[in-house]
Image (cartoon, helix red, strand yellow):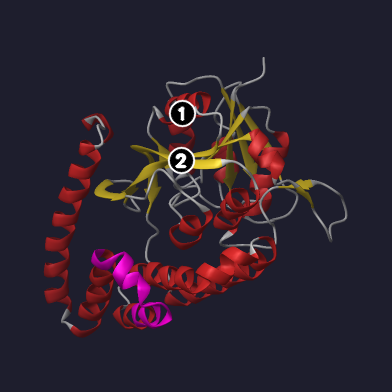
């Protein structure tokens, strides 16, 4: 019997997390799914852990060489049987009602091609935090997606197979021909590039669910140099987008760049690199002062946190940060509950 939903999970050197990720799929209240695990040549015990699950819905596909996240997702999609395709990064997890909620949403809204959810942050060790991604959920056009990426992370969306088929293209410069959906030239920013191509070039709509159904794991530490690589990858995405959405880029490119710089400044704050954070935040404001007018609260809080982390003694900054986190967490919980979300999701 053909499953209604295919879950695609790329796996590469995630032995510490992959068991929890798989368990969160198998624990779904919606059971009419297949889970396609794409082993992208993991060199640790990830594959062995995946092979311990003896469930007819679990299928494992092995790459012969490491190809990256975009290629692993493409492999999973090509083998998918479901009407809907969900993506779960193997270091994240899902709420038990995730697939049911998205299935109901897509069934009830035939013009929606991408259904996504709010996400709850969890620590590197898997502890759920009182912080949430709080994106716009409706009336999302290509400009908003380009500037703010409301999907937020690769474990949040569930997409119609028909939507993916509408952006399908053939791989080039490969020894074999096969269909692609994500651009395999990207090792980062491959998700926003795909979402933008869908919204900017097809008739499909994007909508979000108010429940935090995705548990997004924060990376442990990280190098500030990686932020510059991420920025370079984002610029690569912008260069490509100029070809398939030239009018959009002509009007919104600078604003989008400023929002990306602001996002990277927040990442630098989390890495405790105040100097880098201050540099990126300042660059965001000089690139497009408009972000201060459009999102004054978030922009001011980012710039303030960056400069305080750079200039204040560590103990003083941590004290202020803890106060701010408690306040933000309370506000976010209130906003989510105001949307009619049950406490079981918080």
Question: Where's the N terminus, which quadrant?
Answer: top right
Horizontal arrangement in the rendering, residue 93 relative to residue 131 (left or right):
right
Q: Secondary structure at mark 1?
A: helix
The furthest residue to the top: 1
Horizontal arrangement in the rendering, residue 167 relative to residue 194 (left or right):
right
Q: Secondary structure at mark 2?
A: strand
| Residue 137 percent coordinates (x, y) | 39, 44
Residue 208 visible in the shown view: yes
Horizontal arrangement in the rendering, residue 224 relative to residue 327 (left or right):
right
| Residue 306 percent coordinates (x, y) | 27, 76
Residue at 55 percent across and 45 percent down: it is 46
Q: Is residue 1 above or below residue 63?
A: above
User: For the residues marked 1 and 2, what is the alpha-carbon distance in whole angstroms?
Assistant: 9 Å
Question: Closer to the N terminus: mark 1 or mark 2?
Answer: 1
Q: Is residue 209 above or below residue 227?
A: above
Residue at 55 percent across and 46 percent down: it is 45
Magenta span covers which residues? Answer: 281-297
Mark 1 burial class by Cα count in 10 Å: few <14, some 14-19, many 20+: some
According to the image, label 1 marks what residue? Answer: 105
According to the image, label 2 marks what residue? Answer: 207
| Residue 64 percent coordinates (x, y) | 75, 50
Quadrant in the rendering for residue 82: top right
For the residues labelled 1 and 2, say whether their Cβ atoms are less than 8 Å apart. Answer: yes
| Residue 343 percent coordinates (x, y) | 21, 31
Q: Is residue 181 above or below residue 293?
A: above
Viewer-nearest residue: 163 or 319: 163
Query: Is residue 113 part of the magenta span, yes or no?
Result: no
Query: Is residue 295 part of the magenta span, yes or no?
Result: yes
Can you tell which mark lies on residue 243? none
């Amino acid at each position: 019997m053909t499953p209604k939903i295919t879950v695609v999970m790329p796996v590469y050197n995630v032995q510490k997390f992959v068991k929890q990720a798989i368990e969160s799929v198998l624990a779904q209240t919606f059971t009419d799914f297949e889970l396609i695990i794409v082993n992208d040549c993991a060199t640790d015990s990830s594959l062995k852990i995946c092979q311990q699950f003896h469930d007819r819905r679990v299928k494992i596909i092995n790459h012969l060489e490491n190809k990256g996240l975009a290629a692993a997702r493409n492999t999973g999609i090509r083998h998918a049987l479901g009407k809907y395709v969900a993506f779960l990064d193997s270091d994240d997890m899902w709420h038990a009602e995730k697939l049911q909620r998205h299935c109901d949403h897509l069934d009830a809204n035939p013009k929606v091609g991408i259904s996504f959810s709010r996400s709850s942050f969890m620590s590197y060790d898997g502890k759920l935090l009182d912080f949430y991604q709080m994106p716009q959920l409706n009336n999302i056009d290509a400009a908003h997606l380009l500037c703010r990426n409301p999907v937020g992370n690769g474990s949040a969306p569930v997409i119609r197979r028909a939507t993916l088929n509408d952006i399908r293209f053939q791989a080039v410069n490969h020894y074999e021909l096969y269909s692609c959906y994500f651009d395999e030239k990207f090792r980062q920013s491959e998700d926003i590039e795909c979402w933008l191509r869908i919204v900017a070039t097809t008739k499909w709509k994007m909508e979000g669910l108010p429940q935090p159904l995705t548990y997004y794991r924060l990376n442990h530490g990280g190098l500030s140099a990686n932020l510059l690589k991420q920025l370079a990858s984002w610029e690569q995405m912008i260069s490509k987008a100029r070809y398939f959405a030239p009018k959009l880029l002509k009007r919104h490119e600078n604003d989008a760049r400023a929002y990306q710089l602001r996002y990277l400044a927040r990442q630098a704050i989390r890495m405790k690199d105040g100097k880098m954070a201050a540099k990126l935040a300042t660059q965001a404001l000089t690139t497009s002062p408009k972000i201060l007018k459009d999102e004054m609260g978030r922009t001011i809080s980012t710039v303030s946190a960056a400069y305080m982390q750079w200039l204040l003694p560590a103990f003083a900054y941590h004290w202020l940060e803890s106060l701010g986190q408690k306040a933000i967490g309370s506000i976010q919980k209130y906003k989510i509950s105001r949307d009619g979300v049950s406490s079981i999701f918080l």
